[in-house]
């Protein structure tokens, strides 16, 4: 059984930047093409692909331009219950309307 590798946020961000570069190149797009289609600056695409640094808003714009925005839909969804016990506990628990300070 393979043990999952834990990554730091910096490593995950860098990997995402590299994946975006791969998707862009697979479409035979230049960085400027992706920037124009996403409505972001060329320097934003360059910085993201090389370092992984990007704002969430720009990441979503780039994802939409690449046709991958729907992949964010499942992010942070509660886990699916694996047993009846877990399902009953989940339905009995209500989430607070607001966080505590």
Image (cartoon, grey):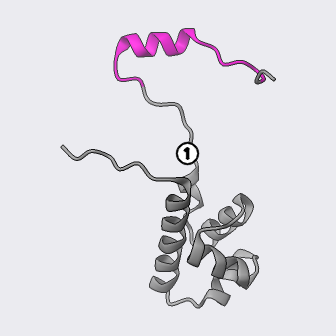
Instruction: In this rendered view, identify the residue nearer to me: 9 or 42.
Output: 9
Residue 84 higher or lower than 7, as above or below? above
Residue 90 higher or lower than 10, as above or below? above
Give, as a single range, the part of the protein colored magenta: 81-98
Dot 1 lies on which element? loop
**Picture coordinates of residue 40, whole percent (x, y):** 75, 76
Residue visible at 57% across and 52% down in the picture:
72
Residue visible at 18% across and 43% down in the picture:
1
Q: Does the magenta stretch include residue 35?
A: no
How many numbered marks have been drawn onto this rendered protein structure?
Answer: 1
- Please tell me in which quadrant of the rendered image residue 31 appears: bottom right
Residue 13 higher or lower than 35, as above or below? above
Residue visible at 72% across and 62% down in the picture:
55
Asked if residue 2 lies left or right of residue 94, the reply is left
Residue 69 higher or lower than 88, as above or below? below
Which residue is farthest left?
1
Instruction: In this rendered view, identify the residue nearer to me: 98 or 27.
Output: 98
Asked if residue 29 lies left or right of residue 83, the reply is right
Asked if residue 92 lies left or right of residue 32, the reply is left
Q: Mark 1 points at which residue?
A: 75
**Picture coordinates of residue 2, whole percent (x, y):** 22, 47
**Picture coordinates of residue 30, whole percent (x, y):** 59, 91
Q: How crowded is mark 1: few (under 14 residues within 10 Å), some or many (20 or more)?
A: few
């Amino acid at each position: 059984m393979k043990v999952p590798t834990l990554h730091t946020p910096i490593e995950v961000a860098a990997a995402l930047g590299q994946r975006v570069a791969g998707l862009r190149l697979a479409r035979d797009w230049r960085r400027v093409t992706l920037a124009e289609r996403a409505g972001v600056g060329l320097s934003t695409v360059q910085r993201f692909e090389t370092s992984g640094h990007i704002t969430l808003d720009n990441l979503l714009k780039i994802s939409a331009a690449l046709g991958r925005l729907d992949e964010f839909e499942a992010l942070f969804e509660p886990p699916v219950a694996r047993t009846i016990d877990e399902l009953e506990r989940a339905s009995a628990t209500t989430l607070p309307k607001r966080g505590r300070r």
